[in-house]
Amino acid sequence: MSKKNSTDVKLHLPNGNPSQSPPPNPSTGTPSGFKAFVLPYLELMRLDRPNGYWYFWFPHVCGTLLASIQYQMHPLNVLSSNLLLLWGVLIMRGATCTWNDTCDADYDRQVSRCRHRPIARGAVSITQASIFTLAQTALCIGTLTVMPPLCALYSIPAVVGWFAYPLAKRVTYYPQVVLGFPMAWGVYMGAAAVGADPLHLKPLHDTIRSLLLGSPDASADQFRSALVQIAPDPATTALYMGNVLWTLCYELVYSHQDAAEDAAAGVKNLILLYYNRDPDALPSERFGTKPLFAKIAACIVLLLAMTGYLGQLDLIWEIFGVAGCAIGLGIMIATVKLEDPGSCAWWFKVGNAKYVGGAMVGGLVGAYTMQWMGPL
């Protein structure tokens, strides 16, 4: 598949840059069968840009597969859990993107690629967007009620992280790091969805439940004891941290598209610490981030290798998951043109999800399949 035909929906501005796309026309855009007043809400959910769903879903899939390997769970459990998670991710991404656009409306109006977003262009008001965020959040809570009880507790850190991310842009140059933690939290959430408890939160869950129900046996000491009992599973935690860094990696690629305008708008961004503001600098001299990418990539590969070792995964994980990710990240670092928004957009929308995320999921699918089939 060529790069030219692989991005989400290419709608061109006069400068021909597909990374700065206006909203879809009601008669020709992706959700063409809906009335015009519905389209802005679908855009807030990023339904016109479906590749982003892979970044939300892949950590969840990885979590379900690793837990299923560790606890030898039945394929039907893995399949049903991932279908439910897919629905949850659809709504969850919509809620987080709507919240992000609500917080960033003033910034978005100053950035070419973002000024056509529904709130920034005035198609949806702040009040309407806030109500829409709450409605999607309510659907997420409803989804949690049909999942294993521990999932509700596991979801809280991710919600806090997604709430904090757009606010972090105002106070720190490391918002991508802040985003990495809730995005990768799907690893833990996916494990909990198939019935595992990778952080050993059940004592805390039971204590909170007793406190809420007013049980006479519940106490502050019991709560503190439950906190002390939290014990992360080593393999799952290594996979989680690998996904945190992977999120940082693809978000940094994404952020190169807007570096100059972010600086002018006052948005804090890790890229700006590496941005050459010299007006006489050549395009290829604008950024000095490739050494940073190389270090992040090396740490990702190391953490994925640790996942295999700690989780005693089949060799197929090392071949497809670890080596595959290493090759994908290496190709990206070697070929992405950070000064070219089109190149950055392709590696964010397609390249990272296809080569790196696909390698991680493919390696775990292979390891789970080999375990389920048994020795050949």
Image (tube, rainbow, N blue to C red):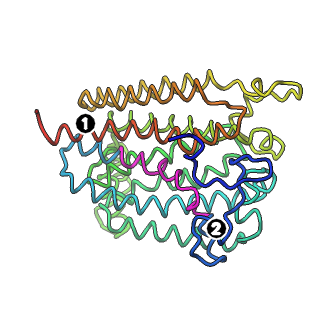
Determine which residue is flagged by label 1: 367
Q: Give the image quarter of residue 153.
A: bottom left
Q: Give the image quarter of residue 286.
A: top right
**Measured Cα–Cα span from mark 1 to mark 2:** 43 Å
- Give percent across and percent down for residue 234: 33, 33
User: Is residue 42 part of the magenta span, yes or no?
Assistant: no
- Give percent across and percent down for residue 208: 36, 60
Q: Residue at x 62, y 64 (%)?
A: 43
The C terminus, quarter of image:
top left
Please name the amino acid that badge 1 sits on.
Ala
Please name the amino acid that badge 2 sits on.
Thr
Q: Residue at x 34, y 53 (%)?
A: 204
Magenta segment: 44-62
Q: Secondary structure at mark 2?
A: loop
Q: Nearer the viewer, mark 1 or mark 2?
A: 2
N-terminal-most mark, 1 or 2: 2
The answer to whether the residues at label 1 and label 2 have Cβ atoms under 8 Å apart is no
Q: Mark 1 Cα within 10 Å, few/some/many (few <14, many 20+)?
A: many
Q: Secondary structure at mark 1?
A: helix
- Answer with left or right where residue 343 lies relative to residue 51: right
Residue 325 lies, with reference to residue 141, above or below; the image says: above
Label ID, residue 28: 2
- Give percent across and percent down for residue 82: 33, 55
Label ID, residue 77: none
